[in-house]
Image (cartoon, helix red, strand yellow):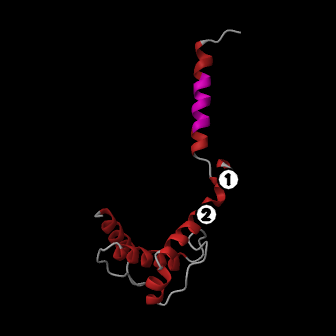
């Protein structure tokens, strides 16, 4: 069978379509363990925070409960999770030797994130 110029173009188009489709796939399409990757990352994060004594240094100071193994992996209470993230970010920035004001729950979330990112960029 002879492959004409039209056949090659079809193959290339099919290959490009398949590549684009694979880029749009969610975690379940990437493999059986991909859906659980965020849980593994959260467990690693928690281990690292514990090594830095986050419970004693960050949480007790603000009268907060310790994080569960999957606290940030599951969207349970976005407002609470955001405040916890900001509290931990501020504590880590301070622990790195930079002065950083602890955000309050009533602070504008956009301003808080902007301050955190600005400080991190200056590292």
* 69 lies left or right of 50: right
* 65 lies left or right of 91: right
Closer-to-camera residue (106/100): 100
Magenta extent: 10-19
Q: Residue at image x 31%, y 66%?
A: 118
Q: Residue at image x 35%, y 70%?
A: 116
Examine the residues drawn in magenta and state their main secondary structure.
Answer: helix
> Mark 2 = which residue?
40
Q: Give the Cα separation between the discs numbered 1 and 2.
A: 16 Å
Closer-to-camera residue (119/22): 119
> Mark 1 = which residue?
28
Label 1, residues with CA under 10 Å away: few <14, some 14-19, many ≥20: few
Q: Is residue 11 inside the magenta stretch? A: yes
Does label 1 or label 2 sit earlier along the sequence?
1
Toward which corner of the image does residue 36 lie, by quadrant?
Answer: bottom right
Q: Is 60 drawn above or below residue 34 in the view shown?
A: below
Closer-to-camera residue (45/31): 45
Q: Is 121 drawn above or below residue 115 in the view shown?
A: above
Q: Residue at image x 48%, y 90%?
A: 63
The answer to whether the residues at label 1 and label 2 have Cβ atoms under 8 Å apart is no
Toward which corner of the image does residue 8 lie, by quadrant?
Answer: top right
Could you tell me which quadrant the C terminus lies in?
Answer: bottom left
Closer-to-camera residue (60/52): 52
Q: Is residue 52 inside the magenta stretch? A: no
Image coordinates of residue 99 in percent, x first then y, are 29, 77
Say what secondary structure mark 2 lies in.
helix
* 96 lies left or right of 63: left
Say what secondary structure mark 1 lies in.
helix
Q: Residue at image x 48%, y 78%?
A: 84
Label 2, residues with CA under 10 Å away: few <14, some 14-19, many ≥20: few
Image coordinates of residue 20 in percent, x first then y, are 57, 39
Looking at the rendered structure, which numbered label has been put on residue 68?
none
């Amino acid at each position: 069978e002879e492959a004409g110029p039209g056949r090659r173009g079809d193959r290339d188009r099919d290959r490009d379509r398949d590549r684009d489709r694979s880029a749009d796939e969610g975690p379940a399409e990437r493999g059986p363990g991909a859906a659980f990757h965020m849980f593994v990352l959260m467990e690693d994060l928690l281990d690292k925070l514990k090594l830095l004594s986050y419970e004693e240094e960050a949480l007790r100071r603000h009268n907060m409960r310790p994080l569960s193994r999957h606290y940030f992996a599951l969207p349970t209470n976005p407002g609470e999770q955001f405040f916890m993230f900001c509290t931990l970010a501020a504590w880590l920035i301070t622990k790195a030797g930079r002065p950083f004001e602890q955000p309050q729950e009533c602070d504008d979330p956009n301003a808080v994130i902007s301050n955190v990112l600005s400080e991190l960029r200056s590292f």
